[in-house]
Image (cartoon, grey):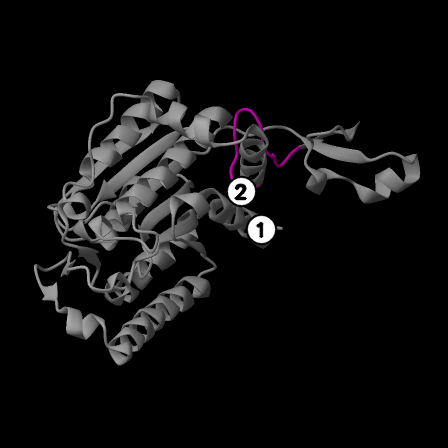
Amino acid sequence: MSTTGPSTPSRSGTVGSSQAHSRLAAVRARLDLPLVRRAAGLLDGRHRSIFSGHGQDFDEMALYLPGDDVGDIDWKASASTGHPVIRRFQRESNLAMVLAVDTGRNMAALAPDGSTKADIARFVADVIGYLARGRGDQLALVAGDRERVVQIPARGGTEHMEMLLRRIDAMFALDAPPSNITHVLDRVLTWFTRRSLVVVITDEVRPPLEAEQTVKRLRTRHELLVVQVADALPTAFGDEAVDDVDAPLGIPEFLRARADMAEEARDAVARRRSDVQAMLRRYGVQTVTVSSEADAVDRLMDLLRRSRRARQ
């Protein structure tokens, strides 16, 4: 897909910038505690933690208490006792989470809400880092594009999470090399031999169809979730000048104003999106498309919820 963005300086300058403040604190200020608890709870069963999760070895029966996962209720035992009863399992050791992030130039393009796709991808990564830190999980990073791949081993703790998130932030830029999420996924495949939860953050029409064998192998070895950031259409900006991010090619206003051009652009994106979604469904990969920071958390919750149901 040809990603696009207005040529005004405020929207086409460097996307990433180093921030001195705590990224985790900024996320905490934006999220409600009940929402955080629900999101962390949805990770249970998908991903093991030293603080919460489901093991394979049965431990005991216990009375249900507020905050317990209703999915653990043993309905037959509850009926016989007259009280809700849950089954508890021994907790398993940590299973690392891996962020696989597309930091190529296409992420400098605009999302439908007018922010850059990098802004949304950055916020999604921040939320995942915040959840991982709160759960006591370990988080690793593989981020890159056609020419660069950065990898950071899985560790836990606030300092590690902050460093990892700042590294992602610094890689987003309009002058970054072109995207190649397949390059990033291949590195995940060769670097992580133990089963992990891999969360991919990329463009709405990626991973590309050419990455099918990589996706298939990743899905066999790891749990795989894909967060796709939506791209704004070049016809969505009226009389505002628009440039192509991947190539310095201006799109004339008379073309953007034509209804048939707008419809053709929408159809082309829809076809590519449909092809990618079909490829991911073949391997049971759950995906979600995020259009703005405002809907990012709700969409992540939906992704985790669907992913958990698929496991049950």
Q: Nearer the viewer, residue 22 or 103?
A: 22
Whether tag 1 and tag 2 are in contact, CB under 8 A, the answer is yes
Q: Residues within 10 Å of mark 2 (few under 14, many from 20)?
A: many
Q: Badge 1 local density, few (<14 within 10 Å), some, or many (20+)?
A: few
Dividing the picture into quadrants, the one containing residue 241 is bottom left
Q: Residue at x 40, y 65 (%)?
A: 277
Q: Look at 42% across and 36% down and name the residue there.
A: 128
Q: What stretch is highlighted in magenta?
A: 45-57
The residue that mark 2 highlights is: 46
Magenta-span inclusion, residue 122: no
Q: Where is residue 25 in the image (x, y as percent from the top left)?
A: 40, 23
Kindly state the secondary structure of the residue where label 2 is placed: loop
The residue tagged 1 is 311
The amino acid marked with disc number 2 is Arg
Q: Is the magenta stretch mostly helix, strand or loop?
A: loop
- Asked if one can make out residue 137 in the rendered structure from this viewpoint, the answer is no
Q: Which of 81 and 110 is in front in this view?
A: 110
Q: Which residue is drawn at 73% across and 29% down?
A: 66
Q: Position of residue 92 (x, y in %)?
A: 55, 30
Q: What residue type is labelled 1?
A: Arg
